[in-house]
Image: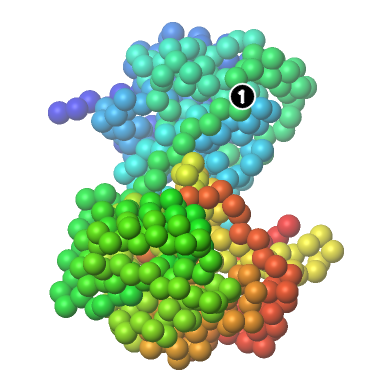
Amino acid sequence: MRCYLITLVYPSNEPSPLFENAMRELSGVDEVQCICVQETHLAEGFNKALKKAIFPIVIFLRKEVRICSTDWGKRVVETFSSSTFGILGTLGTVVVPISGMLWEKEEPLCGSIWYQEYSNEGKNQFGGVFPGNVLEVVALEGSFLAVHKDRVKSLFDEAFKGDSFYEVDVCLQNYMQGVNIGVLFGIDVLKENFDEQDALFLNNYKKFIKKHTELPCRKIPKILFDEDKKVTIENEPSVHILIPNQGGVEDLIDCLEALYIKTNYKNYKVTIIDYGSTDDEIKEIQCYIGKNPKTEIKISQGCLLSQIYNEGAFHAQERLLLFLSKKVIFVNDAISLMVEEYIKNPYKVGTIGIRTHLKNHMVHQYGLQLISIETQEGVFELGLDFKGYGKAYGYKNETQRAVMGNSCECMLIERDLFFELSGFNVNYQYSLQDFELNLKAILLGRENIIVGGAVGIYSSYKRPKFHPVDYTLLMSFINDNIEGVTPYVYLLSA
């Protein structure tokens, strides 16, 4: 039988038996050695505690921090035992900027922390929650650090006085020497007060910048999905995949190659709708797709994406339409996963989409989003965006129902429903026709769905931009249907 043993180190001018007993009771381990260190110089105190620790797994807490969840110690021990991680925490980042300040941008952060009170109001969650996973990061926020003494290569740098920058430094020092650093889930850490910049903060900042000339430091986040999931669908409904194309043959071929390799679904057809490629580019496409009888190319005289998609949908005879950008490279059998959701309740479903990641694995989109921003003047402004854009783990690896909508970069919809909604509004000159179509589906009583386990890579770094003319047209539609749209607007205070 495994014996669970840990050492807990916490800052305090005097030992606190009450605090220690509370942490022991919640830990779920057989024995907890507790060591208190002086608050004034944490790096020095933590190094001394490491020498005093009688167990290899040592947890360091910042001042005024307590752990609120049960079996937290057991979870730490088991994670170290089943992995090669050397340092673990509950909140970390995949990017350390030149400033060394982990809070400079929210997007690279992952994990959670509670502030001031252990309640829903006090919880700060960065990215999704992925039980059973440990997310690899570059550095950790210092409220909770779990260290395996036998795996770390560097100790705390005692040149950092007070309680700032020492934790980022020790993580970077070990990361550069190949130590694995991770964020784990299921441990609720409460910081009872916000950190204030003490008199030593500026000196520590200057030392950190002078020491770490290698910054910024970035780790590519892992794309999480169930690689082993297989979908079997009886009596597969027919799917017609519509891919608009203008030049850029290499991107198109990459898209098709991934589609052919990753898709186990059988009952589909692909039409490339070309609207401006050269004769040589069309010949190159024809040469490639000649190997696949499921794929054809048609020439369109349209110039707007909404016109091109409507034209392709009109000529399609299949039950389901899949609008697909050639910039989307499937990572798994996304088509089967989307169709699986459709057949669960075809009379309720509106649009179905997937999540996509940028080439650096940050999120490209996890659905469309309407954001109401309250400015400092008390005025509400409506913003549009791709949900999760640029975040390391801003998604859930599961199906999300009743969402605002999906991007036409990869959107499945029943053909009859598409025409019941009058197709894409051709008055949009550049974009946002997908925003309106999704809202029309909601107003009709349909439910838009994101299949979080269906994944693609978006082979561009361009953030979506919306033309003022299109924005004005969409705002007019929203204002005309404000009561039905309002529940799908995410409120954000500036």
- Dot 1: what SS? loop
Q: Height in image: 173 above or below 124? A: above
- Residue found 31% across the figure and 25% down from its top: 84
Would you identify the image quadrant in which residue 108 lies? top right
Asked if residue 269 can be seen in this view, the reply is yes
Most extreme residue toward the front, as rendered? 279
In-front residue for pair 414/350: 414
Q: Is residue 175 above or below residue 356?
A: above
Identified at 70% across, 60% down, the residue is 493
User: Taking 201 as reference, is 439 left or right?
Assistant: left
Query: How many neighbours does mark 1 have within 10 angstroms: few (below 14), some (14-19), or many (20 or more)?
Result: some
Pinpoint residue 56: horizontal percent, then vertical percent: 34, 17
9 left or right of 486 in image: left
Q: What residue is shown at x 76% (from left), y 22% (from top)? A: 202
Name the residue located 33 percent from the left edge and 79 percent from the top edge: 320
The quarter in which the N terminus is drawn is top left
What residue is disc 1 on? 215
Q: x, y percentage for residue 256?
A: 34, 58
> How many discs mark residues in the rendered view?
1
Q: Is residue 11 visible to us here?
A: no
In this image, 332 relative to 463: left or right? left
